[in-house]
């Protein structure tokens, strides 16, 4: 709830932009009387007053969120790299298994689904790699090497899983 009349609001917004600019939406929700009135009547601004500045702010934010979901949805479904998102970070995974015939990377970022999208690429030296675009957050993952689940030996950050093994953990 941004109040453009106060210095503290301007300073806080600037601090937020300085620290989180690459992971925040553009729209700012301005405080106004109609938003407070709607809340006091137990109604949404959509039901209370669609001409209010607060309604326009929330609609602008909604459009940003929908656009971002479409971008992320396209990337997750088709793995297209032509729709970059400021919030997404490209993470490169490596697995050194020269004798393996198939290596997949599976984790919380893809709901532990083994599919063609989880297949890693074999390099000439026998190492495997895959780039995945991830939103900021913490993820658990494992490699599926010739149908055998293995934690990432190059990542010491691990947690116990419910199957008696370890999951590797990354934080973006």
Image (cartoon, rainbow, N blue to C red):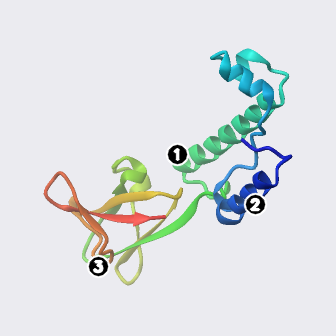
The residue pinned by badge 3 equals: 98
Q: Determine which quarter of the picture holds residue 59.
A: top right
Left or right, residue 154 beside residue 30: left
Q: Residues within 10 Å of mark 2 (few under 14, many from 20)?
A: few
Res. 77 mark: 1
Mark positioned earlier in the residue sequence (3 or 1): 1
Which residue is at 38% across, 50% downward? 115
Helix, strand or loop status at disc 3? loop
Does residue 100 sit above or below 78 in this rendering? below
Res. 6 mark: none
Closer to the camera: disc 3 or disc 2?
2
The residue pinned by badge 2 equals: 14
Pick the front one: 52 or 125: 52
Which residue is at 76% across, 59% downward? 11
Does residue 122 sit above or below 43 in this rendering? below
Mark positioned earlier in the residue sequence (3 or 2): 2
Helix, strand or loop status at disc 2? helix
Q: Residues within 10 Å of mark 3 (few under 14, many from 20)?
A: few
The N terminus lies in which quarter of the figure? top right
What's the CA distance linking mark 2 and mark 1?
Answer: 35 Å
Which residue is at 64% across, 47% downward? 71
Rendered location of residue 106, percent (x, y): 35, 56
What's the CA distance linking mark 3 and mark 2?
Answer: 50 Å
């Amino acid at each position: 709830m941004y109040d453009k009349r106060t210095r503290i609001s301007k300073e806080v917004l600037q601090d937020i932009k300085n620290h989180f600019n690459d992971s925040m939406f553009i729209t700012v929700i301005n405080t106004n009387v109609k938003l407070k009135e709607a809340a006091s009547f137990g109604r949404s601004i959509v039901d209370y007053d669609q001409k209010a500045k607060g309604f326009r702010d929330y609609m602008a934010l909604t459009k940003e969120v929908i656009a971002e979901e479409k971008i992320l949805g396209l990337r997750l479904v088709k793995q297209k790299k032509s729709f970059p998102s400021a919030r997404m970070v490209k993470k490169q995974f490596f697995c050194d298994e020269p004798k393996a015939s198939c290596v997949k990377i599976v984790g919380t970022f893809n709901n532990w689904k083994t599919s063609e999208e989880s297949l890693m690429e074999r390099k000439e030296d026998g190492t495997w790699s895959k780039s995945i675009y991830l939103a900021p957050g913490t993820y658990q993952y494992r490699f599926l090497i010739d149908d055998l689940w293995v934690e990432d030996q190059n990542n010491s950050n691990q947690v116990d899983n419910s199957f008696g093994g370890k999951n590797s953990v990354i934080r973006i």
